[in-house]
Image: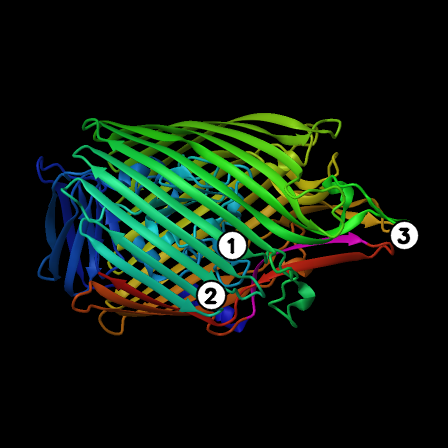
Amino acid sequence: MKRTIAFLAIVLLLPFGLYAQHPLRIMVKDADTGEPLIGASVFLQGTPLNGQTNPKGEIYLKRIKEGDYIVKVSYLGYKTAIQRIQIPSITQIEVALETSSFLADEITVQATRASANTATTFKNISKEEIAKDNLGQDLPYLLAQTPSVVVSSDAGGGIGYTNITIRGSDSRRVNVTLNGIPYNDSESLGTFWVNMPDFASSIDNLQIQRGVGTSTNGAGAFGGSINIQTSGRIDTAYGELDNTVGSFNSMKNTVKIGSGLIKDKFSFDARLSRLRSDGYIDRASSNLKSYYLTGAWYGKKSLLRANVFSGKEKTYQAWNGVPENMLDSNRTYNEFTYKNQTDNYTQNHYQLLYSNSLSDQFLLNGALHYTHGEGYYEEYKEDEKLMEYGLNPVTIGDETIETTPLVRQRWLNNDFYGLTYSLRYDPASNLNLTLGGAYNVYRGNHYGEVIWAEYASNGKLGDRYYSNDANKKDFNVFVKADYRFRSIYFFADMQVRKVDYSYLGFDRNANLLQQETSLAFFNPKMGVNVRFNNSNAYASVAIAHKEPNRDDFTDSSPDSRPRPERLTDFEAGYRMSSGAYTIGLNGYAMLYKDQLVVTGQINDVGAAVRQNVPNSYRLGAELDAKWQPFKGFSWSVAAAISKNKIQEYTYYTDVYDANWELSGQKAVTLKNTDIALSANSIVSNELAFIPFKRSEVALITKFVSRQYLDNTGSKERSIAPLFVNHVRLRYQLPVRGLANIGLTLKVNNIFNELYETNGYTYGYYNPNGDLETFNYYFPQATRNFLLGLNLKF
């Protein structure tokens, strides 16, 4: 605890304002017309600077330390310019950008991305930043140092089933898109990263928007959104081998090849990966495979790209966690012992992306997509009622047997397809309009089979003891406008979304029948952004809606069906980039209406599902900063403090009678109670030092305050605060005949802390009237390592 307090004190009190010595003025213009380019991205390598030009096409960088630097300037539709300068002999430069002969791949995600002039809270992450930690752990672990993020792994080591929360919102409230195409599962609304093994190796960049953000495709973003762009054009041919070994018999092998640009028109790239790990938790093994293929045609004013990628996973189940009473004696305990207690799933993706610069004022983007997923999880059940599987009781002599041990498989076979589009119109230099949207269709077939039973009765192999189909149509259209008046940028975004869902559920008489529901949402957003020389301030308000998930629908009747959730999100912030530091500071108020939470209450069809709570909120402030007082040293900090409350919450606990029959439920109402799994303080820290050329030593730290397992705010049902440290060592070695040899060693949890990041709880009143509570946790790995070797040709 003392270390935690000391760390927080250092983060909050150490100043970011140590200054360097010299100023630099950079002016960016169009090489043909001489017009200033507003919002051009400027990066001074060797410093944390990454700013954009002001309404005069200029950017001022102050207090730069003496030395040689490289200035990199980019702007959509123009060739990137690189210029070497020496400080202090040069105090101002003029950069003239030439129009690009190709459309940039970045335009395919432009409609759903926030820019520096957008009044929303976001963070961009480049492929270079991703590559630093890309040693086989799932993508959430590569985003763990961003503000308000907490990650967790069922297996404990970051390979297999992992999850991410942003501002306390789980994967069902975090919208994920791949090249603007929705990735969240259409029914559960969650994101299963295990179906995308080593996908980070095919990412060019991504953007995390916290809060509602800008209009996007797929389910509503209630905590944030992750907008991923896959690999773009690489002009020269290349080959790359990426291999990792590590603790728990972890291994990653990746092969990447690319053709480069052929005849100034075509390019082809491919990746093949496999990952294996035994996991930190007993038997929590993973066997993962994936590939990624892409080909593109580049015209002067158009771009056509086809992506085909797939992920195949087989993981031993560890999703039940570890009972609290075993954390001290056997932290790696796994209650599953059946040898094939596994989850098996394959997901294939096909994308066709098209962009066309119709004129100087019009830009068209469109995409067709299709995803097929198929798989099952298999499990041993010790004592199941035969009648629940459509099996007759078995009579042996005078004994009638009504239960049996069995092995079952639960299957999901689904298809997801549709289109996304956007049309950008720039009628004037200070105004642009975007019309966009999507139409997507999901078809899912859920069914179960018994593959073995001690008493199989009248069952035959291949019989389905349940089978139901689900169909979902998701349509949205949005209009976005950006208007600049001098240095003030106004932003407005209006989205209409309609969802039609057909599924097998209960009617008012508790009979299972095919049900249908139709929902319509209006999601407006608006904001203002004021730019200064090296900084900007913004404020926005946005409204979002989100439909209930599959279980909320199927386990309820029309009389008890939950209502959609509504969020009003207020954001305000300040971003600054100057000299040796960059700072982003923002505050937010996320006000929920009818948020869905678990209460334990049993509805009219006997199911305990999520219920709406009238009013709840998340209030917080976030810091995202980097300080580089001199070359070879940098300090990055991401910090968040928040207050996450349900204003009035009633929870229900089962009560059992003397015969252990459910006799009713006990209700308790609480006021202003904490939202489950929502830490009030999250701080990430990275100290990076370059002791000599092409090397790096980094200390990475994460602090997460107490999280409650349910919405009662009970310390007895909570996850203790965690404070964990990692070390990363990197060395790049150029060798004749190779483009690069890279070695990376990451030692996770260097102080061997015992900690958990996720869990759940349940309880009941026993026949004696005593409350019995059962907490389950997901322990994370003790000290472990990953060693990577990267060869580039």
Residue at image position (23%, 67%) is: 631
What residue span does the magenta drawing correspond to? 754-765
Q: Is residue 411 magenta?
A: no
Is the residue marked by circle 1 packed among few (<14), some (14-19), or many (20+) residues within 10 Å? many
Alpha-carbon distance for marks 3 and 1?
A: 44 Å
Task: Identify the residue under disc 3.
Answer: 658
* N-terminal label among 1 and 2: 2
Residue at image position (11%, 58%) is: 85
Residue 343 rendering spot, x and y as whole percentages: 56, 52
Residue 150 rendering spot, x and y as whole percentages: 49, 56
Alpha-carbon distance for marks 2 and 3?
A: 52 Å
Task: Identify the residue under disc 1.
Answer: 314
On the question of residue 614 being in view, the answer is no
Give the amino acid at mark 2: Leu
**Closest to the observer: 761 or 155?**
155
Is the residue marked by circle 3 packed among few (<14), some (14-19), or many (20+) residues within 10 Å? few
